[in-house]
């Protein structure tokens, strides 16, 4: 155990696994479980996410025997995070308004609405609850996973730029699965949006490094996720009109 926790090679292997795991998790609940009953899809989602988010605690706490504690509140970087989050939200809304009625968006409406229905969130209340969960809770879990664990521990072993770049690309990778499900008819759009996610991941990694706190990137991430679900709500409105 002592040799393992002190091994640079072992930690890099764990981090490589951590970089790939969310893509496998997303494939499991988003693609491979497609066609299963709603309850089965939700159960797969819950178990897969539990495995993903338990990994940092198991490695850092149980194996490396590090003392884990909730980070102290720090306002450092919050303004930068808010500015970035609002800028991304505004750009996202502008893109959505621009693409309204365009084939690249119209052709994605069917898969988006079908996925919402298959996941059992085709009611207004269910969708709003899911959006609130992702914006507030899931964004925090992703910051804990990607910035505190993956980026933070990579930065112990490689140069800062490499740590930012590797963690950002890995962060974007599992989003490609979702984007491809909706925009396989427009590969350029899927890759462009994935690149935007990678840029966001890089900015949040830098912000985490600058602020020395998870709160600034979390707040920024929260704003962006809220904007994404606002757009999603507009796309899904026809589903709610038949409640």
Image (cartoon, grey):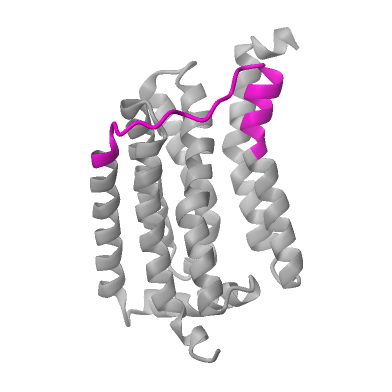
The image shows a total of numbered marks equal to 0
Does residue 195 appear in the picture of this structure? no
Residue 69 covered by magenta stretch: yes
What residue appears at the point 73 percent right and 57 percent down from the top-left corner?
44
Q: Position of residue 132 (x, y in %)?
A: 48, 61
* Quadrant in which the C terminus appears: bottom right
Q: Nearer the viewer, residue 197 or 45?
A: 45
Relative to 192, say whether 19 is above or below: above
Left or right? Give the position of 121 relative to 202: right
Choose top left, top right, bottom left or bottom right for residue 14.
top right
Residue 31 covered by magenta stretch: no
What residue appears at the point 40 percent right and 18 percent down from the top-left corner?
159
* Quadrant in which the N terminus appears: top right
Q: Nearer the viewer, residue 90 or 218?
A: 218
Relative to 165, say whether 106 is above or below: below
What residue appears at the point 72 percent right and 8 percent down from the top-left corner?
2
What residue appears at the point 39 percent right and 32 percent down from the top-left corner?
73
Q: Nearer the viewer, residue 74 or 43?
A: 74
Relative to 11, say whether 126 is above or below: below
Instruction: Give the magenta part as a residue range.
Output: 54-79
Q: Position of residue 83 (x, y in %)?
A: 23, 47
Residue farthest along the front direction in this orientation? 73
Q: Position of residue 28 (x, y in %)?
A: 69, 55
Residue farthest along the bottom direction in this orientation? 242
Q: Position of residue 125 (x, y in %)?
A: 53, 75
Does residue 85 appear in the picture of this structure? yes
């Amino acid at each position: 155990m002592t040799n393992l926790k002190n091994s640079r090679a072992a930690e890099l292997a764990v981090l490589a696994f951590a970089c790939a795991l969310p893509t496998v998790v997303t494939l499991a609940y988003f693609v491979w479980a497609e066609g299963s009953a709603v309850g089965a899809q939700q159960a797969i989602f819950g178990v897969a996410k539990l495995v993903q988010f338990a990994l940092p605690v198991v490695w850092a706490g149980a194996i490396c025997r590090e003392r884990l504690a909730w980070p102290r509140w720090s306002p450092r970087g919050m303004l930068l995070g808010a500015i970035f989050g609002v800028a991304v939200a505004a750009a996202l809304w502008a893109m959505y308004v621009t693409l309204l009625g365009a084939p690249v968006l119209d052709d994605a409406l069917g898969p988006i609405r079908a996925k919402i229905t298959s996941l059992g969130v085709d009611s207004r209340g269910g969708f709003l609850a899911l959006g609130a969960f992702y914006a507030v809770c899931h964004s925090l879990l992703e910051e804990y996973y990607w910035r505190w664990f993956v980026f933070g521990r990579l930065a112990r072993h490689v140069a800062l730029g490499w740590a930012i770049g590797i963690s950002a690309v890995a962060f974007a990778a599992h989003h490609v699965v979702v984007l491809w499900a909706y925009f396989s008819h427009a590969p350029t759009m899927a890759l462009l949006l994935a690149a935007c996610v990678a840029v966001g991941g890089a900015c949040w990694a830098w912000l985490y490094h600058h602020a020395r706190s998870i709160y600034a990137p979390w707040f920024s991430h929260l704003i962006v996720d809220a904007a994404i679900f606002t757009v999603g709500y507009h796309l899904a409105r026809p589903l709610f009109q038949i409640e």
